[in-house]
Image: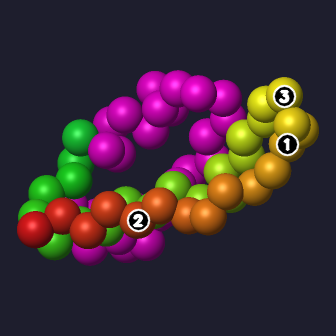
Amino acid sequence: MTFTGAGYPEFMHKAVSGNSFNAVRSLIERARPGSTITIDEIRASGPGGSRTLPPIAFNLF
């Protein structure tokens, strides 16, 4: 995950594994209008196998 903009004095990147955001909870809580949070390198697995999903970006206004 990457964090930029308001609330983050410099570009921040933090790796998350699994289905929980507890490792980055404190960074998410710092978000405010003007912040951008991007979730990238999303890997999903299911009955059809594994695949990489496109990134998701949240621009807060």
Comes first in the chain, label 2 or label 3: 3
Residue highlighted by disc 3: 47
Name the residue type under label 3: Pro
Q: Secondary structure at mark 2?
A: strand
On-image quarter of the C terminus: bottom left
Q: Is residue 30 left or right of residue 27?
A: left
- Can residue 13 be spotted in the picture? no
Residue 50: which numbered mark, if any? 1
Callout 3 crowding tier (Cα within 10 Å): few <14, some 14–19, many ≥20: few
Question: How far apart, in angstroms, are the residues tagged by discs 2 and 1?
Answer: 22 Å
Foreground tag (2 vs 3): 3
Residue highlighted by disc 2: 57
Q: Is residue 22 left or right of residue 16?
A: left
Name the residue type under label 1: Ser
Q: Is residue 13 left or right of residue 36?
A: right
Question: How far apart, in angstroms, are the residues tagged by discs 2 and 3?
Answer: 27 Å
Residue 22 highlighted magenta (yes or no): yes
- Residue shown at 16% from the left, 71% from the top: 34
Q: Is residue 37 left or right of residue 46?
A: left
- Residue shown at 37% from the left, 34% from the top: 25
| Of the pair 49 and 24, the residue shown nearer to us | 49
Residue 55 location in percent, x, y?
Answer: 56, 64
Q: Magenta stretch?
A: 1-28
Callout 2 crowding tier (Cα within 10 Å): few <14, some 14–19, many ≥20: some
Q: Secondary structure at mark 1?
A: strand
Please tell me in which quadrant of the rendered image residue 8 appears: bottom left
Question: How far apart, in angstroms, are the residues tagged by discs 1 and 3?
Answer: 8 Å
